[in-house]
Amino acid sequence: MTNILIIEDDIHISGLLCDLLRQNGYAPAAAYSGTEALLLLPQGDFALILLDLMLPGKTGEEVLAEIRGGSLSIPVIVLTARTDKETTTQLLRSGADDYIAKPFDNNELLARIDVQLRRAAPKQPETAQLRHKDITLDLDSFDAFIGDKRAGLSKREFEILRLMMSHPNKVFTKNNLYESVWGGEFWGDDNTINVHISKLRGKLHGISPDTEYIQTVWGIGFKMAE
């Protein structure tokens, strides 16, 4: 799963953020001061940081400066109640990748997290192949093969499989899948995702009936089966 560090001294807000991230397939860790955050950072393989500015000990600005002054290139989204142009401009110049004003909308925060994670993800060359178990995903022919047998995927099925195979350990929520593959805001239409996952599974199962390729993580979403 994708690890995200939350640096927020308000226990209530931190708890809400942890719950939100868990519900959407992420693995959150919490730090309640700047000093604690800098101690935690080397210990976890964090893909993104949510950083409050008003922290005890080292401030959010000081934490950001230390992160950017080191060798870490983790995306940082700042949580701030200050939205004047001078403050936000300085944040971006100091190395923040994005900021969101408090109080924030949960869906907007999740969308901003997804954008930063996609930007930070290693880019696959268009001629590359993705592999998982005995699936080969050919990015030139836009199809999947199990051994030498072609799966015959539709465009949406291919994009779902490419997204999941690019991050085989991540649990994708239906919201993640819809916004990444369909490119729009998810309004809770489970049927669209369920139908495409079912058809994709059926095509893979038709070639290799004894192998599970896509795992359902109940209450969260889907991931590539280990």
Image: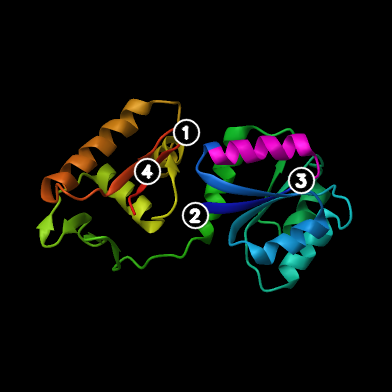
Which residue position is annotated with label 2?
118
Cα–Cα gap, marks 3 and 1:
28 Å
Which residue position is annotated with label 3?
8
Q: Residues within 10 Å of mark 3 (few under 14, many from 20)?
A: many
- Residue at 21% x, 37% y is 199
Disc 4 or disc 3, which is closer to the eye? 3
Q: Residues within 10 Å of mark 2 (few under 14, many from 20)?
A: few
Amino acid type, callout 4: Val
- Residue at 16% x, 58% y is 146
The part of the chain drawn in magenta is 9-22
Q: Nearer the N terminus, badge 3 or badge 1? A: 3
Q: Position of residue 54 (x, y in %)?
A: 85, 47
Which residue position is annotated with label 4?
181
Q: Residues within 10 Å of mark 4 (few under 14, many from 20)?
A: some
Amino acid type, callout 1: Glu
Dot 2: element: helix
Q: Nearer the N terminus, badge 2 or badge 1? A: 2
Q: Nearer the N terminus, badge 4 or badge 3? A: 3
Left or right relative to 205: residue 43: right
Q: Which mark is residue 185?
A: 1
Disc 3 or disc 1, which is closer to the eye? 3
Cα–Cα gap, marks 4 and 3:
32 Å
Q: Are marks 2 and 4 in contact (CB under 8 Å)?
A: no
